[in-house]
Image (spheres, rainbow, N blue to C red):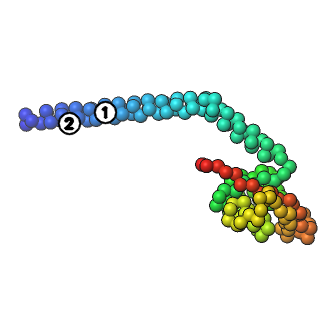
Amino acid sequence: MNPLLPPTIVLSLLAAGLAAGLLREQRRRVQAQSRADEEQAARIRATPHAQRLEQHNAELQATLGSMAEGVVVVDPEGRIRELNPAAAELLRLDAAADAGEAFAQRVRNAALQRLLDTALGLLPQPDEAPMASEIELHNDPDAPSDPDVPQHLRVEAAPVIDPQ
């Protein structure tokens, strides 16, 4: 028997045991950090500011959802960010499916697009008057309503200035 073999085996076993111990310690640290992160997230959610923001968002969604007037929010690139059920029905859109889509691709109406482009600053505004227009929407020929009877809408556009 080689006298060096047992110490080598013992050292190998000790090294494996040391590695397993280090892994267990690292796992404990990761779990402790994860618990600390979860606790911090819970504290943030419990702050009055976060609660006010959540309440404000819920109130805004309830208000938009109950309005008879259609409301569409479009980002600076012309993509649909939000629309309430009334707007979805008037424009024959699906609020969930069309969110993030280009408004011009989903609603094809030249007068409405000019109004939107003016509100986005892509076209000059003729005067300081509110951006408003009478729009005629023609129904989809496949729609259940009479396709020959257009809808006449008064549309107003207003840019929302948000530094973020």
With respect to residue 16, does 154 lie above or below? below
Of all residues shown, which one is farthest toward the front? 127
Identify residue type, mark 1: Leu
Counting from the top left corner in percent of width and height, residue 101 is at: 67, 60
Question: Which circle's residue, 2 or 1, is located before the other in the chain?
Answer: 2
> Is the residue marked by circle 1 packed among few (<14), some (14-19), or many (20+) residues within 10 Å?
few
- Pick whichever, 46 or 9, lies toward us: 46
Asked if residue 139 shows in the view, the reply is no
| Label of residue 12 in the image | 2
Q: Give the image quarter of residue 124.
A: bottom right
Counting from the top left corner in percent of width and height, residue 25 is at: 35, 30
| Label of residue 22 in the image | 1
Number of the front mark, 2 or 1: 1
Identify residue type, mark 2: Ser
Q: Quadrant of the N terminus?
A: top left
- Pick whichever, 89 or 64, lies toward us: 64
| Label of residue 63 in the image | none
Spatial separation of the CA atoms under disc 2 and disc 1: 15 Å
Counting from the top left corner in percent of width and height, residue 57 is at: 70, 40
Label 2 residue SS: helix
Which residue is rendered at x = 70% and y = 56% of the image? Answer: 74
Label 1 residue SS: helix
With respect to residue 46, does 155 lie above or below? below
